[in-house]
Amino acid sequence: MKLAISFTGSQGQRFPAPDVSRGFMLLFIALANIPFWLATTHSSAPSDAVDTAWLWTRTLLVDHRAYPLFALLFGFGLATMVNRRIAAGTRSYLESLPGIEAGREPTSQEQAWAREQATVDARRLVRRRGLWMILFGAAHALVFSGDIIGVYGLAAAVFAGWLTRKHRKRAMAFSVVVTIAVITTMYAMGSHVAAQGLTAAAAMQQGAGESATTLLSYVSGSITSWAGNSVATVLFSMVVPAMFLGARLADTDLLAHPERHRRLLAAIGLGGLGIGALGGIGYGIWATGGTLAAWTSPLHEVTGLAGACGWLALLALYAGGPTTDGRLTGLRRLASAVGRRSMTAYLSQTFLFAAVFLALPALSGIELHLGEARAAGIALAVWLTTVSLCAALERGGHAGPFETLLRTAVARSERRRRLPAPPTPVAAPADPVAPASAYELVR
């Protein structure tokens, strides 16, 4: 396998941990999304002991843990792209200055100017990418109202400036505000559901709404639900705090060189999953037929970020650091192939789920009645199908078609901007300390 190169530029090794983590993350996403299809198509069946065991596993380790993991990796990817674009752009702007080709060293003011222009370009890139992701998400929502691409696109477009200029204090303050909003909102919702005495299955069916009678009603209901949920998810979930945390990881080598931090990552992995599991116990009681306490909803949501961090740490340890020849083998190679085509794999999951839960019953007249464990088996089969698809693309040397489409759209929609004039260097008078050829800036 050839040395993988990052999408963020023609230089720089693509480290295996983020890609391998994305590949396995998409399995968690499939497992987390399957309840949507069961509820929407009314395909669920009464639970047995195996279903109950799986419900406990999914609640403690997957639900509200998969999407924060997605957000961590999304933030990491954005920040990596920003760092490399700013570095490459700064070099390009400096090389365009007069006298540089002749060997003149740029002044500190010129370096600051070049870096500022590169930062502005990076911010525009992140925002443009985010806006296109919103459009991709809207198209995806025609079939699947639980789309998350638009949510991350909205977060990128809104916070592009904070990400490129590394406003960490602002990001931390906003994350605290969002966490408080999550706790308050989820507690109110939990109190309402508890007062009604709804079971988890009934609440899920209520959230899914009535079955659509026509294709038009399904599509219109799906896109409307997606639009409202996207804004609510940015403001009232742990997605944005997770994105900021992932962006911060890009300035460390925890994911680039996990082999250097084995003890720390093992502690984060076990501790994070432990906190996430403990935080989900109350919610698990409700999911398996017990009563809901109001405090369990916010606790389950907030500790989901800890669980996501735990998964990321363990997956990074499994992926390991870069090798001298850039080769991956076995399951790591397959997971990396999926991770580098994560949008294609994610959208393919929806097409496959729609084929199973919408097209197949409509064409065959067979109604699906699946328990939770069997539905999880379908999710696993769907993920394995996407693994096969991405492996075939890898063997052929092809990028994911939706990644290619996004890159093309982002590149072609770029618009030139008027650059401010660079600082003008002029020769300074000779003095005993500085040579006659020294330069200083005149503003």
Image (spheres, grey):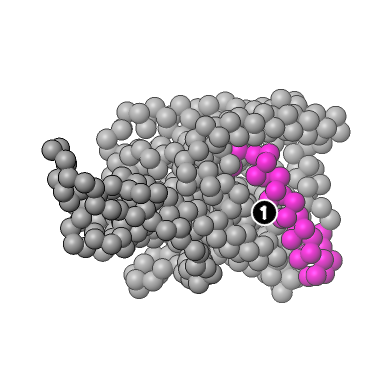
**Front position in the image: 269 or 72:** 72
Q: Residue at x 67, y 62 (%)?
A: 138
**Front position in the image: 89 or 386:** 89
- Type of the residue with mark 1: Gly
Q: Find the magenta span and give its range.
A: 211-239
Left or right of 109 on screen, residue 103: left
Residue 424 in the image: above or below residue 236: below
Position of the N terminus, as image quadrant, is bottom left
Observer able to see residue 383:
no
Residue at the right extreme? 196
The residue where tag 1 is placed is: 146
Left or right of 295 on screen, residue 261: left
Task: Give x and y (percent) for residue 228.
Answer: 75, 51
Residue 72 in the image: above or below residue 81: above
User: What main secondary structure does the magenta stretch of the protein show?
Assistant: helix
Q: Residue at x 42, y 58 (%)?
A: 421
